Image (cartoon, rainbow, N blue to C red):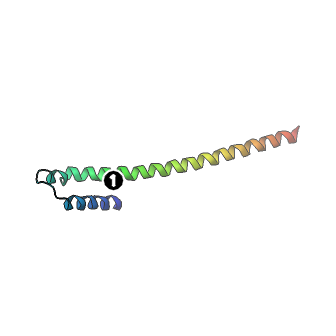
Amino acid sequence: MKPIVDQIQKLQGNLNSIQLTTDVKPILTSPVMVRLLAIEAKIDELKIDIEELKEVKQIEKEEYEKLKRKLKELEEELNNTYQ
């Protein structure tokens, strides 16, 4: 949760450093905008998690294929032994 808070504070700091008209600044610093920034930060975290899961899935798929080949080799060896 800390990275989200840091990102929100950074974005709020960026908003405060930009010279905005009085019509726009209240909208950008409103609680709704802060919530949207929090949601955006969470989406970014989820994207990272998804990429990590894809990598794990690929590794597991490769290990599964390797075990499958080994099992097939063992079955063939067993069949050859009994023939």
Residue 2 image position (x, y, % from top left) = 34, 62
Q: Residue 42: image x %, image y %?
A: 35, 52
Q: Left or right: 27 with respect to 51?
A: left
Image position of 10 with respect to 77: above or below: below
Callout 1, which amino acid? Ala
Residue at the extreme top of the image, as rendered: 83
- Residue 51 position within the rendered picture, expressed as x and y whole percent measured from the top left: 47, 50
Residue at far right of view: 83
- Compared across the picture, whether 14 is left or right of 58 comes to left
Residue situated in front as seen by the camera: 27 or 68: 27
In the displayed structure image, the side of residue 62 where residue 19 appears, left or right? left
Residue displayed at 55% across by 47% down: 57
- Where is the N terminus found, in terms of image quarters? bottom left
| Quadrant occupied by the C terminus | top right
Dot 1 corresponds to which residue? 41
Which type of secondary structure does the marked residue at label 1 adopt? helix
The crowd level at tag 1 (other Cα within 10 Å; few <14, some 14-19, many 20+) is: some
Residue lying farthest to the front in this orientation = 19
Residue at horizontal 21%, vertical 49%? Answer: 32
- Residue 59: image x %, image y %? 59, 50
- Count of marks overlaid on the render: 1
Q: Which residue is drawn at 87% across and 39% down?
A: 82
